[in-house]
Amino acid sequence: MAEVNHQIRLAARPVGLPKESDWERAETPIPGPGPGEVLIKIHYLSVDPAMRGWMNDRPSYVPPVGIGEVMRALTVGEVIASNNKGFPPGEFVAGIQGVQEYALSDGTDLMKADLALAPAPAWLNTLGIAGLTAYCGLIEVGQPKAGETVVVSGAAGSVGAHAGQIARIKGCRVVGIAGGTEKCAYLTDELGFDAAVDYKTQPIGAGLGQACPDGIDVFFDNVGGEILDAALARINPFGRLALCGAISQYNLTDKPYGVRNAILLVPRRARMQGFIYFDYRAEWPAMLEDLATWRADGRISVRDDIVEGGVQAFPETLLRLFRGENFGKLMIKVAD
Amino acid sequence: MAEVNHQIRLAARPVGLPKESDWERAETPIPGPGPGEVLIKIHYLSVDPAMRGWMNDRPSYVPPVGIGEVMRALTVGEVIASNNKGFPPGEFVAGIQGVQEYALSDGTDLMKADLALAPAPAWLNTLGIAGLTAYCGLIEVGQPKAGETVVVSGAAGSVGAHAGQIARIKGCRVVGIAGGTEKCAYLTDELGFDAAVDYKTQPIGAGLGQACPDGIDVFFDNVGGEILDAALARINPFGRLALCGAISQYNLTDKPYGVRNAILLVPRRARMQGFIYFDYRAEWPAMLEDLATWRADGRISVRDDIVEGGVQAFPETLLRLFRGENFGKLMIKVAD
């Protein structure tokens, strides 16, 4: 093949928000699959807050992206050449193929993406990282019971929107925290949240107090910092705080925010627990069945926020996440 | 009966450390038991960090002690008059009879304290609040596995000393944090801790780093604040932080310390959970069997720090706790 594979590689470790010079825009030949390998043409790539953590040179749940390496990203694409019987040409697959147009895989990290069940972007949204992350955190960590109050931060984001809707399906009263009247209206009017708190127009503590007269039983947190602290202040006895992420803290150049109300975990006998959806891989098939059902019957409704422009749009698109500008699952369309 | 019942009552809500004017030294007639009631002559009362929380006018796991009420305290004493067949005269009982010399009870909050099994002070120590709190927090919340590294703060205190020794019994590597060389030597030389970190003579982060080359799997926290933050920095993937208390924070007049490393709970998939031993009442009998066995066979060794002077010694004795001056379970001897 004579075509070129455009890639976005990590050129430097960012300090604070990633800037253009932290990236290298590279071109390489499209590789051919070796024994057992497949060549994937990437159609969509997922833009996620977790990417910021992957860029730091710190041990974490996955190794840091190396300098000069293709930036790690979840992708969905089509197998266009295959030496692997498990994944014949023409099949769509979800995986972690990175910010590039073509990628090789030995198949171990691939999941079949059945386009008859849902279109390609859904495999990065409800049937991918967003839906699975929400499911793992809400159900496995948060363990909500019908009638409880569940609060979700970053609720208009892809994970938050799923977490809130799953909590509704489980019979909970659901309150979302989001920035701006448009996002808050979306939560209550389109997604069926019981209430929304706009952190941009009211002090978060007062807003939560008003929206949660019976306190908070489960807090699903995507934001961290002050919002986590305000939720802790209102956590009920035996409450659960499922920590999914802390987008407010990822680009700080100073120390992270100090959570003062962590001390309340003792008298409230509350539990605050971090999670990563990768750890629940064994349960994914059952979770995906539920998610596919809820998606099909309309109980889960989502937005795809799809950016055109291919891999070259990645550096700027990532910044949109940290500015809170995305509305729904942020993805980049790489190919048709 | 003509004798007087001396009591220490709460006179005012303390700001910061409790002072003499926050207490009322009262005398009342010794009451006679009504139908179903027993009269208890208190022999020992337990002086615990949790008392500081009970003095605040904030909803918590127990109601605040009211102004003018006898200060709440765990006690062990003898039934000296009884209208309750469950508790005949001469029987020793542990309960929550408060800082006074005599108390009535309807029996619902009483536990028999078998002096043939252990002397009276043990029912406030290994077979009481200290042993049970350590057992609940370490085993039920911390869930240590053999070979893991368990770190205990306030390790020379009564709860900490139990938590560390139970962790040893469970086959863990145990590191204690305490203030001063005498306490640290006690941990390693007398209690069999594998290492001790003296927070008074070295930065806590460096000390923990050195003592825990393989990180921390379970952190049993009695101290909170900076020490909790330093432990979080070293918590291993899937680590557990059992929050028992935060003695460093109880007498602050300013805001509590902000825990900056709470953000690490996400990538480490760690769990931080508060607990109160009252919640495990159903499991106490089985726990007490273990504790009595370990006490009898010497695998749990403890110190009683018994203050003479009766209930009048209470206000000053409570302050010893917050100055870190106690060495072992702090109790006041009220009667022989």
Image (spheres, coloured by chain):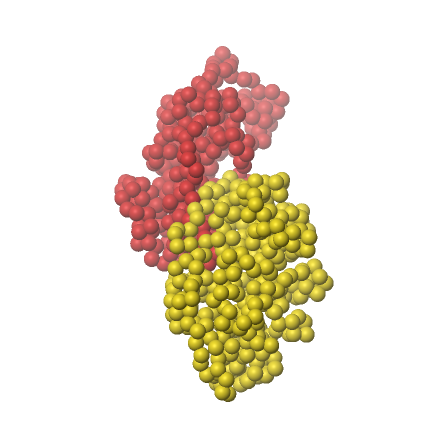
Chain colours: A red, B yellow
Residue B245 in the image, given as x and y percentages of width and height: 50, 56
Q: Residue at x 54, y 37 (%)?
A: A61
Q: Residue at x 38, y 56 (%)?
A: A215
Q: Nearer the viewer, residue A92 or B56?
A: B56
Position of B93 relative to A66 (above/below): below
Quadrant placement of the C terminus of chain A: top left
Quadrant of the rendered image containing residue A187: top left
Looking at the rendered structure, the number of numbered marks drawn on it comes to 0
Residue at the right extreme?
B297
Residue B188 in the image, given as x and y percentages of width and height: 67, 51
Residue A235 in the image, given as x and y percentages of width and height: 41, 54
Position of B109 relative to B170 (above/below): below
Position of A176 relative to A84 (above/below): below
Q: Residue at x 41, y 27 (%)?
A: A18
Q: Residue at x 41, y 30 (%)?
A: A16
Position of A336 relative to B188 (above/below): above
Residue B14 in the image, given as x and y percentages of width and height: 40, 62
Quadrant of the rendered image containing residue A330: top left
Residue B249 seen:
yes
Residue B279 seen:
no
Residue at the top extreme?
A2
Quadrant of the rendered image containing residue A48: top left
